[in-house]
Image: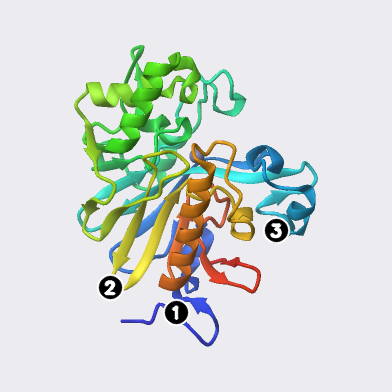
Amino acid sequence: MVTPWNSTTGRNRFRIISAKHVAQANVFPLPGPFDLQRIVEFEGAFIPPDHLFPDSTPQQIAGSAAYREPRYFDQRQNLLVMSFHSILIRTPTHTILVDTCIGNHKPRPNMELWHQRNGSYLADLAAAGVTPESIDIVMCTHLHADHVGWNTKLQDGRWVPTFPNAKYLFAQKEVDHWQQQLELKPSAEVNHDSWADSVAPIIDAGKAVFVGMEDEIATGICIVPAPGHTPGNVILRLEDRGDLAYILGDAIHHPIQVDYPEWSSRFCHDPDLSRQTRTQILNRAVQERAWLLPAHFPTPTGAGVRRTNEGFALIPP
Ligand SMILES: [Zn+2]
């Protein structure tokens, strides 16, 4: 087997990518049987750093490595660049979609960019050679509105499963949490009311499978608990003969948190636990020389991570 890491250059083998992959920045060359691709719903300057990360200071932001990288930070507008994408995993036996972004026609009046979208997500999936019928598994790392949207589509005035042949995997713990929240608060105040149009129709259609926090969902693809952002938040670990990748969802939101792993987002349910989880994942990624694919990292999205004197740094592809 080819060594996944070259200790002389400090580069991992994921750097060795074909011309096709260079041309298609959304395709991630991974080892073994995993063919990974990003389906992008939106990417661009999105949110002021102090809004997403309340613990940050302007000085820390300006001093970060991410600030100096225009793909990650729009200095002119003082906005973090973010991407909203799904990760498509094709294995010899399964076609899996991880996190389903925002969706079309969803009423999200409190979030202008998400409200009543009419984007090209399904056409982009088709361009990747995937029909909705061919998706076997949909996995939501958690049930926030920007991770469940394409679970459903509007058809004849009803929300129906977008992927009619898929099992939709939700962590039982995550489902329990949001059901509790819905008992306590008006639904409009819970996740932009996304349960009603993007989760409940899947459960009602009998397509939901409630999974444990450490289940194997396909050969070499395991759920790993990553609580904090939400109580039942999970990530996926892909392994092939020692080569590893993690699909991270929102365990880490932006490359600037590689500089400051202690910053939890304003949207984290338990900021302290989220901080602990994030630091553990980064440590593990260093030890395991793993490839990371977070849900909102802008292009180039996938990266390795290494230790520095100060903490961690990204190893871009
Ligand atoms: Zn998110």
Answer few, some or many: residues within 10 Å of disc 1's Cα (few below 14, many 20 plus, some between 14 and 19). some
Q: Can residue 295 be seen?
A: no
* Residue type at the position of mark 2: Arg
Mark sitting on residue 69: 3
Q: Name the secondary structure under disc 3.
A: loop
Give amino acid for label 1.
Trp
Residue in the foreground of this view, choosing between 205 and 255: 255
Distance from disc 3 to disc 1, alpha carbons, whole Å, reads 25 Å
- What residue would you read off at disc 2? 241
Q: Residues within 10 Å of mark 2 (few under 14, many from 20)?
A: few
For marks 1 and 2 on the same chain, the one whose residue lies earlier in the sequence: 1
| Colour approach in the figure | rainbow
Quadrant assignment, res 63 = bottom right
Indicate the position of residue 146 as horizontal and vertical percent values. 48, 34
Q: Amino acid at mark 3?
A: Glu
| In the image: residue 204, left or right of residue 311 | left
Q: Is residue 69 above or below residue 304?
A: above
Q: CA distance from mark 1 to mark 2?
A: 13 Å
The x, y position of residue 215, in whole percent, is 23, 50
Query: At which x and y percent is residue 158?
Result: 33, 14
